[in-house]
Image: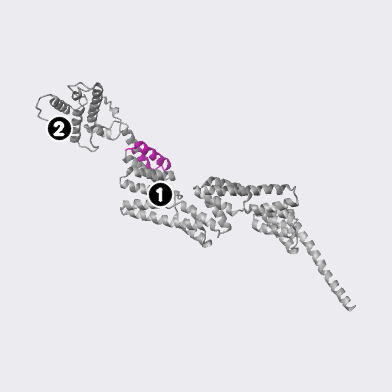
Amino acid sequence: MAAAAECDVVMAATEPELLDDQEAKREAETFKEQGNAYYAKKDYNEAYNYYTKAIDMCPKNASYYGNRAATLMMLGRFREALGDAQQSVRLDDSFVRGHLREGKCHLSLGNAMAACRSFQRALELDHKNAQAQQEFKNANAVMEYEKIAETDFEKRDFRKVVFCMDRALEFAPACHRFKILKAECLAMLGRYPEAQSVASDILRMDSTNADALYVRGLCLYYEDCIEKAVQFFVQALRMAPDHEKACIACRNAKALKAKKEDGNKAFKEGNYKLAYELYTEALGIDPNNIKTNAKLYCNRGTVNSKLRKLDDAIEDCTNAVKLDDTYIKAYLRRAQCYMDTEQYEEAVRDYEKVYQTEKTKEHKQLLKNAQLELKKSKRKDYYKILGVDKNASEDEIKKAYRKRALMHHPDRHSGASAEVQKEEEKKFKEVGEAFTILSDPKKKTRYDSGQDLDEEGMNMGGDYLGGQGMRIACTREVEVAVSQDCATALQPGRQSSKTLSQLKK
């Protein structure tokens, strides 16, 4: 009996504990209701605090974890929310909302397969649940976008990968993996500010994210900031020593920097052959580095221009502007090569492009010079007609005229066909025109400066007076000499004081 009394006493002693447990539950419910009120007002931080108090008072209640998970989701803290949602379904496997929230967290974090399992479980418990049905479709769509993106990345169709990742991120806004893939593809497309922005956002949340550090480095590398890029690649490798992409990029960046600097050094020392070889080797390191390769092509083009390989220089500069159509230096180098090869229309196009981009006095003058040379090139080239250099002396011009006039004089071709006579007469007139201009200092200056020779009313047609004379425009002294020389040289059986070969001197 004594023993029974002691047991009763013991039983009596537990009653306050039971009452305390009930009190805790009531207090937990109060906290939950307060959390609900703040949730309704969208004050999610306060809602979180009260749901936490409820959980502290009653840690075995599934709905409290479910409510806090919902609040964390609204705050964008999906990883923490996932833990609460998983705890809620561990406490109560029949908690449909718990499974939905777990699935939603998985999906937001980019784990579409795990999300599908959660949504399937919700549908097993409530097969008519519309939200579960829709979310299940969304998760499958994300898996499909992932699959397509993986294939397109291998094909280097980076635009399509960006499109797929944008669609996937609509359902998985907290997935760093999708964001990194998108950022990497943006970098490959040359959209560096966008790629940098995505990577920076991730690094603000997780400064040790090796993938984000790699993308930051990749953007700098492709923008030809190689030294800074190496720093990011090294940092990424510290966080993840087996990061293959960062390792390859770091190696390429260092090699590219070294080759380019060696090429520059050889160029400055005047060793153009070695500079050409080094720039060529640098171009083979990484075809994806568009900006640096554009500079390398331009540098090699400069080397080729120094070696007087102007066609090769033009080709290199063309490759440079294909890679970077904003690269002013390449346009200027190519334009100069076009000028040197007398391709004035092409030179004008390049200088126009430069001047539209950078309206400087220097660029305006370069364009003006090219336009002038183009205008001059469309006229008859009197120097070419006489066969003399642009710097020929007055005596050289006179001798050349005498030689060419004798060569094309109509009397010399009187026995030829009508077609040949007509052609020679035309050439004979052009020789006279050329001499008229180039033997007159004032006219020569106007011609050389590209001014319109018709402005002074000069008749450049050249009236031919027949086999016994020359053109009106010719200098009389030379005209008489050519006529006499031609007549003497062409008379059969007569000894001339000058042979035909002498007349041509």
Q: Nearer the viewer, residue 430 or 75?
A: 430
Residue at 58% of width from left, 52% of height from top? 178
Q: Which residue is mark 1?
A: 295
Indicate the amino acid at tag 2.
Ser
Residue 234, horizontal then vertical, whole percent: 48, 60
When the figure is inspected, residue 133 is found, relative to residue 415, above or below; the finding is below
Residue 274, horizontal then vertical, whole percent: 33, 53
Kindly check if marks 1 and 2 are in contact, taking CB atoms under 8 A apart as contact. no
Is 168 on the left or on the right of 234, as rendered? right
- Residue farthest right in this picture: 1
Q: Quadrant of residue 406?
A: top left
Quadrant housing the N terminus: bottom right
Residue 165, horizontal then vertical, whole percent: 58, 48
Residue stretch in magenta: 342-369
Label 1 and label 2: CA atoms lie apart by 55 Å
Is 204 on the left or on the right of 264, as rendered? right
Indicate the amino acid at tag 1.
Lys
Q: Judging from the image, what secondary structure is the residue with disc 1 in?
A: helix
Residue 258, horizontal then vertical, whole percent: 40, 57
Q: Which residue is mark 2?
A: 501
Q: Is residue 366 magenta?
A: yes
Residue at 39% of width from left, 40% of height from top? 350
Residue at 53% of width from left, 61% of height from top? 240
